[in-house]
Every structure is written in structure tokens, then in C-alpha cells.
Image: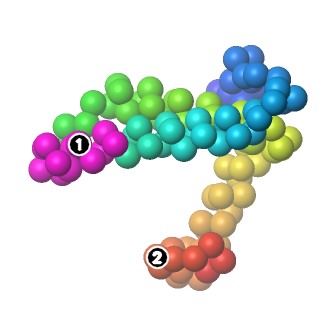
């Protein structure tokens, strides 16, 4: 399955774009799902000596899927194909690698 196909399938379970506060709900959902992943990572650090080999990958896969759903639907809200999001991100990273600025901080490095 490619990213645009995933996006179209995800939209079958999304609310209409014109639903009041829909973009805000999508943003909060995305942050919430990524927060769940971070919370589980924190517990591995706290309770398992940072041994990420003990991460329940089935659970992680589900949480990453929830995050991907929100990302796909949010991109669609602004008429951005998910494949374009991926393509531009890979191009940005390739450019940074070529210029030897993968490390560091700042959006425009």
C-alpha cells in the first residue's frame, strides 16, 4: 500500500472537514497519540533501564498507526497528499545529508 492509498482509506473513518473545530481536534489527536508513545518510552526508561528491546512492538505498532491516521487526515484537511509529505521530507533530509547538517537544530539548516 502506498501513502496516498493509506490516506484515502483512512479518510473513510474521518469526520467531515466542515465539522466545527475539526482541524483542532485532529491536531489534539496527533499530539495525544505521539504523547502516548512518549509516555510508554518514559516507562521503559524509568522501569526497564532504558532497554528498548523490551518495548512491546505490537503495542508500538498500534500507537504508530493511530499517529499515522491523524497525520494522514490532517494532511488531507489541507489538501496535501500524504505521499507529498513523505517525498518532501525525504528530499529535505537528503539535502541536509549532502550539506552535512543532519545534526544540530533549526528548521532551516
Q: What number is the disc on residue 75?
A: none
Label 2: how many residues lie within 10 Å, few (<14), some (14-19) or many (20+)?
Answer: few
Quadrant of the image occupied by residue 37: top left
79 or 96: nearer the viewer: 79
* Residue under pointer 2: 103
Quarter of the figure with residue 63: top left
The percent coordinates of residue 98 (x first, y second) are: 59, 77
Q: Quadrant of the C terminus?
A: bottom right
Callout 1: few (<14), some (14-19), or many (20+) C-alpha neighbours within 10 Å?
few
Q: Secondary structure at mark 1?
A: helix
- Outermost residue, front side: 20
Sequence-earlier tag: 2 or 1 = 1
What separation in Å lies between label 2 and label 1 (alpha carbons)? 27 Å
The relative height of residue 94 versus residue 36 in the rendered view (above or below) is: below
Would residue 48 be counted in the magenta stretch? yes
Horizontal placement of 62 versus 97: left or right?
left
Q: Is residue 78 left or right of residue 101?
A: right
Q: Vertical placement of 20 versus 97: above or below? A: above
Is residue 71 something that shows in the picture?
Answer: no
Which disc number belongs to residue 43?
A: 1
- Main SS, magenta residues: helix
Q: Residue 52, position in %: x, y?
A: 23, 45
Q: Does residue 69 show up magenta in the picture?
A: no
- For the record, the magenta segment spans 39-52
Q: Residue at x 52, y 81 (%)?
A: 100
Which percent across, then down, holds residue 58?
35, 25
| Any part of residue 35 in sight | yes
Q: Could you tell me residue 71's position as x and y percent?
A: 65, 40
User: Of the residues tagged 2 and 1, which is closer to the observer?
Assistant: 1
Amino acid at each position: 500500500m502506498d501513502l496516498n492509498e493509506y490516506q484515502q482509506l483512512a479518510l473513510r473513518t474521518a469526520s467531515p472537514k466542515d465539522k466545527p473545530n475539526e482541524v483542532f481536534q485532529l491536531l489534539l489527536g496527533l499530539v495525544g497519540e505521539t504523547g502516548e508513545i512518549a509516555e510508554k518510552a518514559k516507562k521503559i526508561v524509568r522501569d526497564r533501564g532504558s532497554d528498548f528491546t523490551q518495548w512491546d512492538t505490537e503495542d508500538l505498532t498500534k500507537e504508530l498507526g493511530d499517529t499515522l491516521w491523524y497525520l494522514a487526515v490532517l494532511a488531507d484537511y489541507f489538501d496535501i497528499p500524504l505521499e507529498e509529505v513523505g517525498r518532501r521530507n525525504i528530499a529535505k533530509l537528503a539535502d541536509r545529508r549532502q550539506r552535512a547538517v543532519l545534526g544540530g537544530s533549526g528548521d532551516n539548516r
